[in-house]
Image: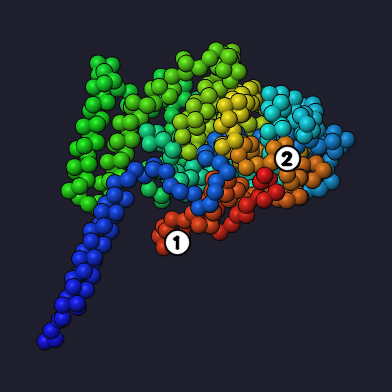
Amino acid sequence: MNSLNRRDFLFRSACGFGGVALGWLCKEEARAAALASPYAPKPAMFPARAKRVIHICALGGVSHVDTFDYKPELERRHGQDSGRKFDTFFSQPGRLLKSPFAFRQYGASGRWVSDLLPHLAGCVDDLTFIHSMHSKSSNHTPATFLMNSGFTFNGFPSAGAWVSYGLGSENQNLPAYVVLPDPRQLPAGGSINWTNGFLPAVHQGVAFRSGERDPIPDLATPSDISPARREASVRLLEKLNAADAATHPGDSALAARIRAYELAAQMQLRVPELVELSRETAATKSAYGLDHPNAATAGFARNCLLARRLSERGVRFVQIFNGGQFGSPRINWDGHEDIVENHRKQALTMDQPVAALLRDLKQRGLLDETVVLWTTEFGRTPITQGIDGKGRDHHQHGFTIWAAGAGLKPGLAFGATDEIGYDAVENPVEFYDVHATLLRLLGVEHTKLVFRHNGVDRRLTDVHGEVIQGILA
């Protein structure tokens, strides 16, 4: 046996103690990570231009040629046969149909908007239009899934879930991802549109029941429990949970469950104040349209005002739906039968509240750190549905979306469709590109935000997506 001299003995002992200390530190770090809130803010991959997102989903297929994409050629050729074969969803191609709505140029940017949306027309200098969108599907449900998750199949995480997973929340008392469905009806596919998919369950969108006294079921504290007593019980629960977690170090499932319960407890304290709009001025509520005689407008207006309140409290991703499932009578933008009747009715619900949201964010200095994204799952055909029809069919080959806020070029029109609004012919854009750009503005590289599932490194943009450099400031 080799003997150790004094120097070797001290060296080996020191290294051994260091190893023990390192092991203890690693264990404590792992335990702390397991106990950390899943909503804790996470560092961006590079300097972010935006802190948060408000995503407005106009469902049913908004007609681009009747809202933001002015086509004089349709006026000149109104009622004519197009002279080409059209790919239509219901295989009932009709004749070229000019927009029944009058278009004008607005703002210093001179962007074209129809009289269908007079309030948004006044905001064009803050908007960044993408006129060259196209989609993989002209079927509502898969196209809506694609718009939200980057996949036409259900079960994949939505963009909001990915943002929650990648960045967490700025407010530990509220979820990172909140959904405000249309008060009239859920979208096609229901809650799958805000699913966490294969991401941890805490990243699923938390849907508020729009228009209800209790926006989240079973959340309200019983009337006989005082706020102070409820606060004390929450603090006691935190201590008990911490003690329980300490006896099971490294149990991430237990830690996640504890954090979910604690978040629910915090929401019991915070959500009632959040959804109570009595402290908003009468002028603010009127600007949004909460006093509008149309109940659908007032309901959607409340959601837009809630979106502002959620955003200013640090919720990372707020999603607002305008329109529900298809049906009869239609409560979305699906103007098959009569484009005038359908789009006027639906525009009335959306125009004033969204314009007020933009102005309110800007006035409060929040637009400089927020991306407001307005999308629809596809557009509508430049021809009638049926020879003598008054409506338009689904159209995936070219349509318009817009965004506003942090890191974007305001007043810009990017891309273009052809002279009748059929094909995206200049700088075509897909939802993969929109998602990649959204993540870039939040300081995240879309190819590096991944989650390994069933042996595959999954991401929001699948194997596609390019940042739309032309719209970035």
Tag 2: amino acid: Leu
Pointer 1 residue: 456
Q: Position of residue 61 (x, y in %)?
A: 64, 36
The foreground one among 401 and 143 is 401
Q: Position of residue 365 (x, y in %)?
A: 58, 30
Q: Residue at horizontal 19%, vertical 37%?
A: 240
Location of the N terminus by quadrant is bottom left
Mark 2 closeness class: few <14, some 14–19, many ≥20 residues within 10 Å: many
Location of the C terminus by quadrant is top right
What's the image's color scheme?
Answer: rainbow
Q: Is residue 127 above or below residue 397?
A: above
Pointer 2 residue: 412
* Residue reaching furthest to the front: 6
Q: Residue at horizontal 56%, vertical 36%?
A: 370
Q: Position of residue 393 (x, y in %)?
A: 69, 38
Tag 1: amino acid: Val
